[in-house]
Image: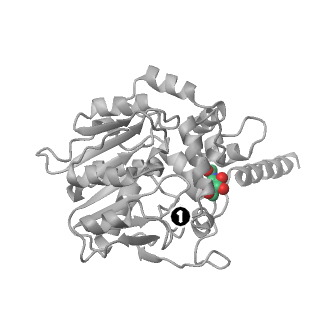
Amino acid sequence: MFTELLAVLVIAILSWAYNFIKPPASSVCGSPGGPPITSSRIKLKDGRHLAYRESGVPKQKAKYKIVLVHGFNCSKGEPGDDPLGSQELAEELGICFVSFDRAGYGESDPNPKRTVKSESMDVDELAEQLELGPKFYVIGGSMGAYTAYSCLKYIPHRLLGVALVVPAVNYWWPSLPDNLAKSMLKKLDIGDRMAFWVAHNFPILFHVWMKQKFFKPSPTMTGQWSVETSSESDLEIMEQKINSPAHRSDEYKRKTTQQGVYESLYRDVMVVFSNWEFDPMQIENPFPNNEGSVHLWAGREDRICQVEIQRYVAKMLPWIKYHENPHGGHLFCAIGDWNDRIIKALLLGEDPEYM
Ligand SMILES: *[C@@H]1O[C@H](CO)[C@@H](O)[C@H](O)[C@H]1NC(C)=O
């Protein structure tokens, strides 16, 4: 009798624990009750779909093909949304932009096996199926830069050039000196610091952490930009973006995390702060004969991807062309013609002036 009771108790506790830890289900596009599929998609080898969008000039006519990798809480955009560079520049230089929803975002199927490596495999297959040719350019912004680092590591033979724009940093990169990582972590808001720590050490419990109400929530993970977490210039840009209806359509905002925040936002944070399959500071120069270039763009006032770490990465990878905007924060590219300047530096080697 006692043994049976104990067994029942153990099973009850285990199933409660299982339900507690089990990640929330996603509402997958095209599944019964899930959001509709409205974008062009390719089917990957593992059966997942990847939604993409082409803009700029048609790829048959394009001289340059650039794969754009979006950041945290963003997506490939909708027809009519601003592409990364201006349409004028695309026409002037002959650029076809290919953007895609990273796994779990927008209309791309979630990838519960998502890793830093799997992201570059997705880019490789996308370029293959869209027939972008043997080589192409990659621009990865913010969180999307981990995909770009992954491309540098795993598919350097397919690259003509790469721009890492205010790239995401991982405080647990092996080559990052302990004292630098610690001092940069200390500069973060306590809510972010705790959430990132959980994402790194106990990713399986990350969504449980995001639900808890005892400790301060992570401002980054909840979209709470404030003077505690952002530079003045970033807050001003946020204000302008919110007030400018043209920048992003409502459709874009609605669709970004329509399949659930777990496989989009949470998975992103779990992957970026995981133990990567490689150390980015050990990546070999993909262009030993200068046949292409790799750029890293940093904003000195960036309080999300701190400039001290970007400088260290640039020092460790001397083949990277390092650009630092002395007046910019994390969002400096969102205003003026910064995107065009970044593209021109990548394609034509033009160095911009800092005003
Ligand atoms: C994501 O973007 C939406 C719409 O722009 C916003 O309402 C939300 O707060 C953002 N979430 C995060 C975590 O930044």
Image coordinates for residue 277, horizontal then vertical, percent: 38, 44
Q: Is residue 92 above or below residue 157?
A: below
Q: Quadrant of the C terminus?
A: top left
Residue 118: give x, y in percent of width and height.
40, 56
Question: Residue placed at 65% from the left, 38% from the top?
Answer: 226
Q: Residues within 10 Å of mark 1 (few under 14, many from 20)?
A: many
Q: Is mark 1 within 8 Å of ligand 1?
A: no
Looking at the rendered structure, the number of numbered marks drawn on it comes to 1
Q: Give the answer, above or below, for where 240 lies relative to 251.
A: above
Residue 129 in sight here: yes
Q: Please state the quadrant of the image where ligand 1 appears.
A: bottom right
Residue drawn at x 83%, y 48% as measured from the top left = 9
Q: Secondary structure at mark 1?
A: loop
The amino acid at mark 1 is: Pro
Residue at 55%, 41% (x, y): give it: 234
Horizontally, residue 16 falls left or right of residue 136, namely right
Residue found at x 17% / y 47%: 287
Pointer 1: what residue? 110
Viewer-side residue, 235 vs 278: 235
Q: Is residue 343 left or right of residue 204?
A: left
Q: Position of residue 304 (x, y in %)?
A: 52, 37
In terms of depth relative to the viewer, which is nearer, 302 or 137? 302
Regarding residue 95, the answer to whether it shows in the image is no
> Observer-nearest residue: 262 or 57?
57
Q: Which residue is outermost to the front? A: 355
Name the residue furthest top. 179
Residue 261's image quarter? Answer: bottom right
**In the image, is 54 to the left or to the right of 295?**
right
On the image, which quarter does residue 298 sit in? top left
